[in-house]
Image (cartoon, rainbow, N blue to C red):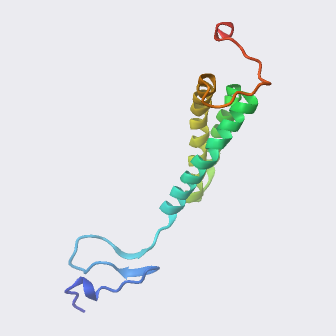
Amino acid sequence: MKDDTISRVIYNPVYCKRILPLETNLCLTRCSMQFGGILLGLASFLSIGLFHPIVIRCEYKYSYRCWPVFLVVGIALVVASVFIRNLILSAIIGVIAFSCFWSINELFAQHRRVERGWFPANPKHHKVNDSEEK
């Protein structure tokens, strides 16, 4: 069987036997479509989208001092992602873990935004001067 042009290539969207003619050096034969990247991108998007209001809410209710919770949850999720055999699930858990770590930074940034008046402060919080903390 002679393959001269790409127009003769057999292509099935779900399972493709050959994408390019045999003369090419690319090894693209017998591939199945991978949706792992799309799932990981979606999980990243949702993780960022969900953690943003969580950070705002936690800073309002508990102040920035709740950052150790994000640290412990992040470390637990990193450890869990190491032991999960499914690559996609492991990657998604890892993305959520590092979203927890980034949330620590965002808690302190949110605290600065509240001090500047960009976000409402919780009137129930006890205001501690920076000089008393040091």
Quarter of the image containing the N terminus?
Answer: bottom left
Q: Nearer the viewer, residue 28 or 13?
A: 13
- Left or right: residue 30 versus residue 68 is left
Confirm whether residue 11 shows in the render.
Answer: yes
Please identify the quarter of the rendering in which residue 126 is found: top right
**Does 41 sit above or below residue 18?**
above
Q: Nearer the viewer, residue 67 or 107?
A: 107
| Image coords of residue 18 (percent x, y) | 34, 80
Q: Nearer the viewer, residue 99 or 76?
A: 99
The residue located at (64%, 11%) in the rendering is 130
Number of labels in the image equals 0
Please identify the quarter of the rendering in which residue 25 is found: bottom left
| Image coords of residue 17 (percent x, y) | 38, 82
Q: Residue furthest bottom?
A: 1
Q: Residue furthest right?
A: 124
The residue located at (19%, 86%) in the rendering is 4
Please identify the quarter of the rendering in which residue 67 is found: top right
**Does 74 sit above or below residue 33?**
above
**Does 129 sit above or below residue 114?**
above
- Left or right: residue 6 versus residue 64 is left
- Left or right: residue 122 versus residue 71 is right
The residue located at (56%, 36%) in the rendering is 102
Confirm whether residue 79 shows in the render.
Answer: no
| Image coords of residue 111 (percent x, y) | 63, 26
Quarter of the image containing the C terminus?
Answer: top right
- Left or right: residue 8 versus residue 35 is left
**Does 29 sit above or below residue 36?**
below
| Image coords of residue 52 (percent x, y) | 61, 42
The residue located at (80%, 24%) in the rendering is 124
